[in-house]
């Protein structure tokens, strides 16, 4: 009889163990930090090529052509209430959030080659302001939908707290109410931020599509003294949020940004969580164009022994897009392009068409006549139609520059980053370039009648530069090289995957065409070498 009882107890324990295992979180599906890499459950490295979903959950005035007149969500919302009335404005924002990012956007993001999205969130969208703040359930469902779409198309998600309670920058980008970093001025705002992150973590703790929590976007600028005044509070706040998240979620990664637009990492004294990675933001707004060095962050990566991610890069031109992603990947730095789409532009993957009579809204902001409610309603109805992906304008040249694939134009100064005798060869190695890549000896000069983006490479006899470009398929394409020569009988050799072509150059800029050049699927190697005289190289276009 005793043996029967023992067998019964063992059976119950076995079944309980079995049922318990069935309900356990499948941890092998979660990405995690392993030293300086991201790895999946099998230990395989994963490289993040992300895109930022800006303007969706935190509208920014510059993406609407509003400038400083309506530069942040609360001001844009006030404008719509003024023009449409409260009820119609509320309906507009409900529709805006419904249609700005949809399943079609995520499907397209995956098709283009991005494997991660970074939605910029406004805390005010999920947590009411004022006395007795309450969570707003209907807006969390926007994130629920995003998670489902991303799961369907194998796209990861990093949640970005772009606008914390009270504001972490005191600027428009965080929807700051009073142009002060009130997150750090009032402990109650920090309490609210902790509560919001714990709510998000508890909601998504079992979801491997979500890979990381970006605790604060670009806290505390240095230019107004905020970083110096409050910077010592950032790491303790990060620790507090992390500790509270870990009480409900031990699996998701956490990503931390430095102060001063995320780029000052001197605030980080230690790695206090072993599933954390660090990020900086990288915008090349120099005039003339110039690639900023990332050596500081490479050095910091060694100190902290964690992966490094560029949480935002973009907002410039195709030359910079090619140059930056190439630079990052050569240094094993993960990246996220900003943003996916905005109004009336040519430098994002998609552009939202400007509504008819949009100038009536802009003129009113500047002090002009107020459009009628009927006029305003028609204009903002058109906004809703225009934000739908099928009604946006796609720029293949932008995405192909980001991913460095054909068809594309390769600027001559975007040779590879593998160094001397691998990506370039020049005789004089002590004289650095004046522009663009100023720590390297390849000579880059400004076009005499061009703008700040128009630069070219100068090579002498036997000097060369090398390039790589990807292709999704085998094809024959037209290749055009823009070049000119200096000296007697200047001659340029062009090598494409071992197929060699020679050109006699003139002393004025000419476009030299090659038809039927075979482009291989995968990686293609290009080399331009001077045989005689001096060559000036502007670009290589592959159509």
Image (spheres, helix red, strand yellow):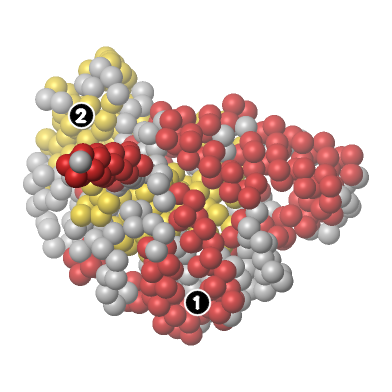
Instruction: Name which residue lies at 23% across and 22% down.
Output: 521
Q: Is residue 117 visible?
A: yes
Instruction: Name which residue lies at 27% across and 74% down.
Output: 270
- Asked if residue 425 is positioned above or below residue 394 in the image, the reply reads below
Closer to us: 65 or 122: 122
Asked if the residue at tag 2 contacts the one at tag 1, i.e. Cβ–Cβ closer than 8 Å, the answer is no
- Badge 1 element: loop
Residue at the farthest bottom position: 229
Instruction: Name which residue lies at 66% across and 50% down.
Output: 65
Closer to us: 425 or 208: 208
* Residue 97 falls left or right of residue 521: right
Tell me the quadrant of the picture where the N terminus can be found. top left
* Residue 380 falls left or right of residue 392: right
Residue 383's x, y, as percent? 71, 38
Residue 232's x, y, as percent? 41, 82
Closer to us: 439 or 142: 142
Residue 348's x, y, as percent? 50, 41
- Badge 2 element: strand
User: Which residue is denoted by mark 2 in the rendering?
Assistant: 524
Q: Is residue 447 visible?
A: no
Closer to us: 36 or 362: 36
User: Which residue is denoted by mark 1 in the rendering?
Assistant: 223
Question: Spatial distance from mark 1 to mark 2, Cα to Cα?
Answer: 44 Å
- In the figure, residue 24 lies in which quadrant? top left
- Asked if residue 160 is positioned above or below residue 53 in the image, the reply reads below
């Amino acid at each position: 009889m005793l043996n029967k009882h023992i067998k019964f107890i063992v059976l119950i324990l076995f079944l309980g163990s079995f049922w318990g295992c069935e309900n356990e979180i499948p941890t092998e599906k979660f990405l995690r930090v392993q030293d300086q890499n991201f790895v999946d459950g099998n230990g395989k490295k994963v490289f993040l090529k992300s895109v930022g979903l800006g303007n969706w959950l935190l509208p920014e005035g510059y993406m609407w052509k509003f400038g400083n007149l309506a530069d942040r969500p609360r001001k844009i919302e006030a404008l719509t209430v003024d023009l449409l009335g409260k009820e119609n404005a509320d309906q507009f924002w409900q529709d805006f959030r419904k249609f700005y990012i949809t399943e079609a956007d995520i499907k397209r993001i995956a098709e283009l080659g991005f494997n991660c999205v970074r939605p910029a969130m406004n805390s005010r969208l999920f947590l009411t302001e004022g006395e007795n703040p309450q969570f707003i359930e209907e807006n969390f469902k926007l994130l629920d939908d995003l998670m489902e779409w991303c799961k369907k198309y194998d796209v990861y998600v990093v949640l970005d707290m772009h606008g914390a309670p009270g504001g972490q920058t005191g600027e428009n980008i965080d929807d700051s109410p009073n142009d002060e970093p009130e997150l750090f001025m009032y402990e109650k705002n920090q309490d609210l931020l902790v509560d919001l992150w714990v709510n998000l973590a508890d909601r998504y703790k079992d979801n491997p599509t979500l890979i990381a929590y970006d605790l604060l976007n670009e806290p505390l600028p240095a230019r107004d003294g905020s970083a110096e005044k409050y910077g010592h509070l950032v790491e303790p706040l990060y620790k507090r949020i992390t500790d509270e998240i870990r009480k409900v979620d031990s699996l998701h990664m956490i990503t931390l940004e430095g102060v001063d637009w995320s780029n000052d990492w001197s605030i980080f004294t230690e790695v206090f969580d072993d599933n954390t990675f660090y990020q900086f933001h990288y915008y090349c707004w120099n005039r003339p164009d110039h690639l900023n060095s990332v050596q500081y962050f490479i050095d910091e990566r060694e100190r902290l022994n964690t992966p490094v991610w560029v949480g935002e890069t973009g907002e410039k031109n195709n030359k910079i897009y090619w140059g930056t992603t190439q630079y990052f990947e050569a240094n094993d730095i993960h990246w996220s392009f900003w943003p996916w789409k905005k109004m009336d532009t040519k430098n994002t993957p998609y552009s939202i068409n400007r509504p008819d009579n949009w100038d009536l809204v802009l003129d009113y902001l500047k002090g002009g006549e107020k459009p009628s409610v009927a006029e305003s309603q028609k204009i903002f109805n058109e906004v809703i139609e225009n934000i739908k992906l099928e009604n946006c304008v796609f720029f293949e040249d932008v995405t192909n520059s980001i991913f460095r694939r054909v068809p594309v134009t390769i600027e001559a100064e975007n040779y590879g980053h593998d160094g001397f005798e691998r990506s370039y060869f020049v005789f004089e190695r002590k004289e650095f370039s004046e522009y663009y890549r100023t720590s390297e000896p390849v000579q880059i000069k400004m076009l005499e009648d061009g703008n700040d983006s128009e630069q070219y490479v100068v090579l002498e006899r036997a000097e060369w530069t090398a390039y790589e470009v990807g292709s999704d398929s085998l094809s024959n394409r037209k290749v055009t090289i823009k070049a000119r020569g200096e000296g007697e009988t200047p001659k340029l050799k062009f090598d494409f995957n071992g197929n060699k072509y020679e050109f006699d150059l003139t002393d004025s800029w000419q476009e030299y065409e090659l038809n039927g050049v075979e482009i291989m699927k995968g990686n293609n190697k290009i080399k331009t070498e001077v045989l005689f005289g001096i060559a000036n190289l502007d670009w290589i276009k592959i159509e």
